[in-house]
Image (spheres, coloured by chain):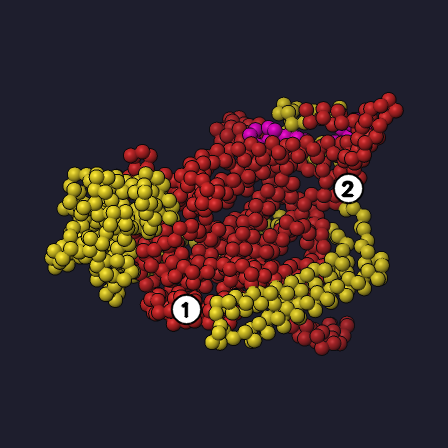
């Protein structure tokens, strides 16, 4: 039987074009005959549909009333009002609006489907463009160009092009004050000693300083620099760079690299909490494995390897904050971070070198 | 003038409505518009409603959003909360967050409007996406609608921009972390990244400027652009007239459907109220973005299991999938003293870039491969364009893998599996998922086409088993009527177009590439059944009775 085109790639090789093989194609039988609905033939069914539509519109009225009652009868300011009151009001407002809208919507659609004429009609499509129009348009454009004389006067054309090309520059330049120049702001945090005084490590958010003796093995502290809460301006900006995680491990499990031996104190170490990936707070500390996990993109850092990345999209270890104990027993930062904290940026490496020089 | 007055008396409206209408008509000429559009024919199909849902969601967004602007204060100044939500009383926060809490707790209906707005935003982006999938899989983007496809793509991007700028406004912990991530991504841009970040935030992150700036973008610039694009989009729909599904009586020269007035207008207008009603139901019963649970933005805390709104998910998921290190080798590189954060830059830009580039260019790619410059107003059933459908599914699966990756931690906790394993699997699927999807989809489409052929030639299975006098059992197949059959056979099946030499007699390299793609597209094809085949199929058996063996042999 006719099995010549069942999906096998080797066909006759001819190119199929519209209109080709017209004889071999099935002829379009035209729009199928219209079938009457129940409501078209049975007046009772039509009447029933009419009542259904009216009922749906009636439901809409009820919905509007529910909304108004819920809005005016429920008092949010009352003494005994609680989150439950708001929930109830919100639910009733939703229910009322839903009934009001769905009543109208389903009513109209039911009306259209059951009672309005449902004859499918066919309409001719028209050409989107007529050749005559195209030619006329071309002539008009030619005339316009000719009348401006722009082709004959290249001096005018070229100076105009130059002027128009330059004119938007002020529109770009005027946005120059959207923000200050970055300079090296990202390279410094609040941890830098002020007037020779080392910054104490304080609890986030209340700002009380932390004693080394408070930090037991296995514990972790969310830390901010002392004095952060006293800032009136730019507090969040500073906090976004300065937040630190403080943990105490068995000193034997830490393997400080050369030059970092004195950055911790008795197994107490402090690392920047801002992920080196895109800046989320690395807030999850897995005490057993000594891993720090960023909840945003799951970058995982190993505390025992100086917060080296062991999983996830971050590329750089978390920066370590060098700490020591002052004569009152409080933990202090001996210096600022030795590298910029947080996500990488174009000038980051330059900043790191300038911080260390 | 005098001719008009003498020839026939001037029209005088009889009713009051008529007089008002006539007054307007004489001044703006509405008659012509009504004559053109009053009975304009629109084809009807359930899948044409996705675009309507998008349009109506946008209207609802404008309505609910306007209400919210009356109460929202986009200031990042510090304040201490003094509203009626007890757990946050006295907490230091921005005015923006405080006013969002006031909208939720102290303004009657405020919470409802916030939730309507958020749900409508989610639905807006979703319906645009589904609408675009419908347009893609049915080939509605073909000439003359390529430009409207591009406008639709721009609308999708604008909808995501509107969503993200709005999501950030309440200045709660969750949205603040979202901005933090955006800041990190921006900073990874070579050369100008740090500057863009400082310019967006008015200095260091988070600063005190960004909410006000996003607010302006969210309530003015982005909606204005969306509105402009919607006008363009609908204008082109009118110019092109709507596409229609294939079927008896429908071809590229006509449009079959219901007249705008009254049926289509009633259905479409009624549908607006239905969309509104469903959104109201969702806003009434399902909490969305409970900002009071998150607290004000603070750069220090973050909660586990945080998710962006769904449409940002695929970018966030791509960020999660990209490994930052391979063993000890860092993906981030420092060259000539400058930092290239490929671990952020690549996942943030490349997948989205590929998706949108291919999406925007696809109509031109297919037009080039098929050399088809005709207008198409009759849609393809997806199975009748197997390679296109397979490409679409490959892209869709690729998107879904990235999207699922945005919830990798939730997948891990809900199914009690290792987070790392989920990530490893998704990394693998990122590469092989689209390939599997392509192969499976193409085979399924071809199989469905063969099934269509079988049904067209041998009729549908009736489930009636008949025992013949000599003991054989057969199932009776009922023949299709000519209308149903035409639906199965009335489609175009393009064939491979081999490379042809140009006017200089040279087969260019570009033409060779085109021919290769044409082969890749159309090599596997199932041609529509022809009358001769139907004749042959009926010739060897009884009319309307076919043995199952015969059906099997057809589909090898």
Provide the major secondary structure of the magenta segment: helix
Frontmost residue, A345 versus B33: A345
SS at badge 1: helix
Q: Which residues are magenta?
A: B519-538
> Residue B203's quadrant in the figure?
bottom left
Q: Which chain is yellow?
A: A
Residue B483 tag number: 2
Estimate the x, y position of residue A119 in percent, counting from the top left: 77, 54
For the point 27% across and 45% down, the residue is A318
SS at badge 2: helix
Q: Residues within 10 Å of mark 2 (few under 14, many from 20)?
A: some
The chain that hosts pointer 1 is B
The answer to whether one can see residue B302 in this image is yes
Estimate the x, y position of residue B58 in percent, counting from the top left: 54, 60
> Residue A44's quadrant in the figure?
bottom right
List the residue tagged with mark 1. Answer: B86
Q: Which chain is red?
A: B
Q: Are marks 2 and 1 on the same chain?
A: yes
Question: First in sequence: mark 2 or mark 1?
Answer: 1
């Amino acid at each position: 039987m006719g099995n010549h085109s069942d999906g096998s790639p080797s066909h006759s090789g001819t190119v199929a074009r519209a209109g080709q093989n017209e004889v071999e194609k099935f002829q379009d039988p035209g729009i199928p005959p219209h079938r009457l609905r129940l409501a078209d033939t049975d007046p009772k069914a039509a009447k029933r549909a009419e009542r259904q539509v009216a009922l749906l519109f009636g439901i809409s009225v009820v919905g509007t009333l529910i909304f108004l009652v819920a809005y005016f009868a429920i008092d949010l300011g009352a003494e005994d009002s609680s989150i439950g009151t708001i929930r109830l009001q919100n639910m009733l407002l939703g229910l009322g609006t839903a009934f009001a809208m769905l009543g109208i919507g389903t009513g109209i659609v039911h009306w259209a489907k059951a009672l309005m004429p449902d004859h499918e009609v066919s309409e001719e499509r028209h050409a989107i463009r007529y050749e005559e129009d195209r030619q006329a348009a071309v002539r008009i454009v030619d005339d316009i160009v000719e009348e401006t004389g722009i082709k004959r006067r290249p001096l005018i054309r070229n100076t105009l092009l130059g002027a128009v090309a330059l004119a938007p520059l002020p529109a770009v330049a005027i946005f120059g004050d959207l923000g200050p120049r970055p300079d090296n702001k990202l390279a410094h945090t609040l941890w830098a000693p002020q007037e020779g005084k080392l910054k104490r490590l304080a609890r986030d958010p209340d700002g009380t300083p932390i004693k080394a003796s408070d930090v037991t093995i296995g514990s972790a502290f969310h830390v901010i620099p002392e004095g952060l809460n006293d800032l009136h301006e730019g507090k969040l900006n500073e906090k976004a760079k300065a937040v630190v995680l403080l943990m105490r491990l068995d000193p034997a499990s830490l393997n400080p690299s050369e030059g970092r031996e004195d950055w911790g104190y008795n197994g107490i170490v402090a690392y920047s909490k801002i992920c080196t990936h895109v800046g989320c707070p690395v807030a999850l500390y897995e005490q057993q494995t000594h891993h720090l996990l960023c909840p945003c993109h799951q970058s995982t850092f190993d505390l025992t390897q100086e917060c080296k990345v062991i999983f996830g999209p971050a590329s750089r270890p978390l920066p370590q904050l060098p700490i020591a104990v002052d004569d009152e027993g409080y933990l202090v930062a001996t210096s600022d971070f030795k590298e910029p904290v947080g996500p990488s940026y174009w000038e980051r490496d330059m900043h790191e070198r300038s911080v260390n020089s | 003038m005098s001719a008009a007055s003498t020839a026939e008396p001037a029209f005088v409206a009889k009713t009051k409505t008529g007089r008002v209408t006539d007054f307007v008509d004489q001044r703006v000429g509405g008659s012509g518009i009504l004559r053109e559009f009053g009975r304009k024919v629109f084809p009807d199909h359930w899948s044409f409603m996705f675009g309507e849902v998008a349009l109506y969601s946008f209207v609802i967004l404008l309505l609910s959003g306007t209400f919210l602007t009356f109460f929202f204060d986009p200031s990042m100044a510090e304040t201490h909360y003094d509203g009626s939500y007890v757990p946050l009383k006295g907490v230091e926060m921005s005015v923006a967050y405080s006013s969002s809490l006031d909208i939720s707790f102290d303004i009657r209906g405020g919470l409802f409007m916030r939730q309507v707005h958020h749900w409508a935003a989610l639905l807006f982006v979703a319906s645009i996406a589904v609408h675009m999938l419908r347009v893609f899989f049915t080939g509605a983007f073909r000439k003359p609608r390529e430009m409207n496809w591009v406008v639709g793509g721009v609308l999708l991007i604008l909808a995501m921009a509107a969503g993200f700028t709005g999501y950030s406004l309440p200045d709660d912990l969750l949205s603040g972390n979202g901005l933090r991530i955006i800041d990190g991504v921006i900073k990874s841009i070579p050369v100008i990244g740090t500057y863009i970040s400082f310019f967006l935030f008015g200095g260091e992150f988070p600063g005190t400027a960004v909410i006000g700036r996003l607010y302006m973008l969210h309530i003015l610039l982005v909606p204005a652009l969306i509105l402009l694009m919607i006008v363009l989009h609908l204008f082109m729909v009118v110019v092109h007239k709507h596409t229609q599904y294939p079927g008896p009586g429908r071809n590229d020269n006509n449009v079959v459907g219901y007249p705008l007035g009254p049926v289509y207008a009633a259905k479409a207008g009624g549908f607006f109220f239905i969309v509104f009603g469903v959104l109201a139901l969702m806003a009434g019963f399902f909490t969305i973005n409970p900002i009071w649970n998150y607290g004000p933005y603070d750069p220090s805390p973050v909660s586990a299991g945080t998710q962006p709104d769904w449409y940002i998910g695929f970018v966030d998921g791509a960020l999660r999938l990209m490994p930052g290190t391979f063993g000890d080798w860092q993906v981030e590189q420092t060259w000539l003293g400058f930092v290239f954060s490929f671990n952020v830059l690549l996942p943030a830009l490349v997948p989205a870039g590929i998706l949108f580039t291919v999406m925007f260019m696809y109509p031109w790619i297919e037009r080039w491969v098929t050399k088809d410059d005709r207008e198409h107003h009759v849609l393809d059933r997806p199975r009748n364009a197997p390679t296109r459908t397979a490409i679409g599914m490959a892209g869709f699966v690729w998107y879904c893998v990235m999207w699922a990756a945005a919830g990798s931690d939730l997948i891990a906790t809900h199914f009690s599996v290792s987070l790392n394993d989920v990530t490893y699997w998704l990394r693998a699927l990122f590469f092989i998922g689209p390939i599997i999807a392509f192969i499976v989809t193409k085979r399924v489409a071809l199989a469905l086409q063969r099934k269509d052929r079988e049904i067209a030639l041998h009729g549908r299975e009736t489930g009636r088993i008949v025992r013949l006098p000599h003991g054989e059992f057969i199932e009776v197949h009922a023949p299709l009527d000519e209308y149903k059959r035409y639906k199965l056979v009335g489609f175009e099946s393009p064939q491979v177009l081999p490379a042809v030499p140009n006017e200089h007699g040279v087969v260019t390299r570009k033409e060779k590439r085109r021919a290769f793609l044409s082969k890749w597209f159309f090599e596997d094809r199932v041609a529509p059944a022809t009358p001769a085949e139907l004749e042959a199929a009926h010739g060897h058996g009884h009319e309307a009775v076919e043995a199952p063996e015969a059906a099997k042999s057809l589909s090898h």
